Image: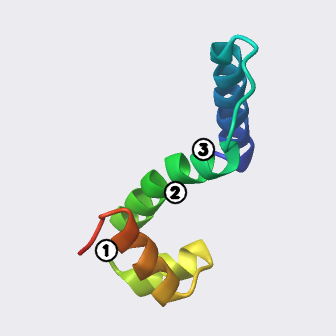
Amino acid sequence: MSKKNIDECVRAGLENYFKDLHGTDPGGMYDMIVRVVEKPLLEVVMQHAEHNQSRAAEWLGLNRNTLRKKLVEHKIIK
């Protein structure tokens, strides 16, 4: 899947979200989207990095300690 396809999926999901609101104003969208996207992103990257945190952090462009903190926050590791 290319970056363009990911962009299109996110855009379509957001359009559906607004449609489901039926005109109600959303609140706290940024934090909601980050929470919804971050956990599966971390899970998939960790799987493909064979649970190597240093490799996953490099792929994500994060400091290894930051990645570890996020993995704990999302209860992916203890």
Q: Residue at x 63, y 15 (%)?
A: 20
Q: Earlier in the sequence, mark 2 or mark 3?
A: 3
Q: Position of residue 11 (x, y in %)?
A: 73, 33
Q: Position of residue 71 (x, y in %)?
A: 38, 71
Q: Which residue is mark 2?
A: 38
Which secondary structure lies at badge 1?
loop
User: Judging from the image, what secondary structure is the residue with disc 3 in?
Assistant: loop
Q: Nearer the viewer, residue 62 or 35?
A: 35
Q: Earlier in the sequence, mark 1 or mark 3?
A: 3
Q: Mark 1 or mark 3: which is in front?
A: 1
Image position of 39 (left or right of 26): left
Give the crowd class for mark 3: few <14, some 14-19, many >=20 residues within 10 Å: few
Q: CA distance from mark 1 to mark 2?
A: 16 Å
Residue 49 in view of the camera: no
What amino acid is found at the position of numbered circle 1 in the picture?
A: His
Residue 56: tell me if it is visible. yes
Mark nearer the N terminus (1 vs 2):
2
Q: CA distance from mark 2 to mark 3?
A: 18 Å
Q: Which mark is residue 51?
A: 1
* Residue 62 placement (x, y as % from top left): 58, 80
Where does label 3 land, which residue? 1
Q: Amino acid at mark 2?
A: Glu
Q: Are marks 1 and 2 in contact (CB under 8 Å)?
A: no
Three-letter code, disc 3: Met
Asked whether 71 or 25 is in front, the reply is: 25
Nearer to us in this view, 68 or 43 = 68
Residue 57 as seen in the image, left or right of residue 50: right
For residue 16, side relative to residue 72 (left or right): right
Question: Disc 1 and disc 3: Cα gap in Å?
Answer: 22 Å
Extreme left residue here? 78
